[in-house]
Image (spheres, rainbow, N blue to C red):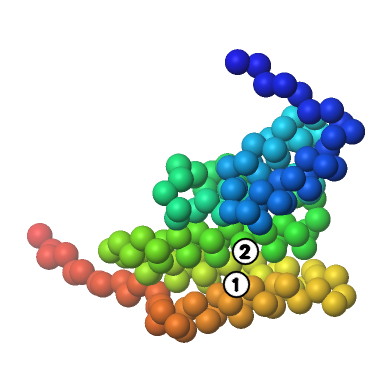
Amino acid sequence: MDLKPLSREAVPAALEKAMRYRLLNEPGEAESICHDVLAVDPENQQALVLLLLALTDRFGKNYRVGVTEAQEILPRVRDPYERAYYSGILAERRAKALLHQDNHGSRYSAYDLLQEAMRFYEQAESLRPPGNDDALLRWNACARIIMRNKLSPAVEERVELPLE
C-alpha cells in the first residue's frame, strides 16, 4: 500500500500534533506522524527528536519496539548537546524498562544503562547552552533511581579451571 505524502506546508502543524499525541500517551500516533514528516523532510531535527522520544515512550509497555531504530536516529541529530542528551534519555528509558521487567539480572543491566545515561548527561552538561540544566536534572534522576532501588554492578565470579 502506498502512503499518502504530507505537504511541506503541513509539517509545522503535524509536528505540533505529534507532540500532543505524546502528551496524550499515544506514542504510536506520534511515531507515525514523525515518519510522515521525515518522508518529506528527512533531516527535520524536531521530527527526529520527537520520533526518538515516541519510540522510547513505548519501552517496557508491551509494545514491540526495539532499541535499534532509536539508536539509528541518534547520529542524525546534528546538535552535539542534543545528541548527547537524547543518548542519555535512550539509555535511561531502557534501564527503566528493565527495572519494570524485574527478570534475573535485569537490575544489573539497569544499573549499567543508568551509568551509561549519566555519562551521556555529563557530556551534555559540558555542551549545554547557558541556563539549560536539563542534563543535570536527568543525571540526578538516574542517581536517585540507583539509590532508591539499591542498584549495583554485577559482581564477576572468578572460576579457576583445573589444569590438565
Farthest residue toward the right? 9
- For residue 163, the mark is none
Residue at image location 35% in from the left, 72% down from the top:
154
| Along the viewing direction, whichever of 161 and 88 lies nearer the viewer | 88
- For residue 88, the mark is 2
Earlier residue among tags 2 and 1: 2
Residue 127, compared with residue 52, is above or below; it is below
Residue 130 in sight: yes
| Along the viewing direction, whichever of 148 and 6 lies nearer the viewer | 6
Residue at image location 85% in from the left, 77% down from the top:
131
Res 119 → quadrant: bottom right
Farthest residue toward the left? 164
Residue 63, compared with residue 32, is above or below; it is below
Would you call the spot at circle 1 few (<14 residues within 10 Å), some (14-19), or many (20 or more)? many
| Along the viewing direction, whichever of 133 and 50 lies nearer the viewer | 50
Residue 7, compared with residue 147, is above or below; it is above
Label 1 is placed on what type of residue? Met
Residue at image location 32% in from the left, 75% down from the top:
155
Q: Are marks 2 and 1 in contact (CB under 8 Å)?
A: yes
Q: Secondary structure at mark 1?
A: helix
In this rendering, position of residue 115 left or right of residue 6: left
Res 106 → quadrant: bottom left
- For residue 118, the mark is 1
Quadrant for the C terminus, please. Answer: bottom left
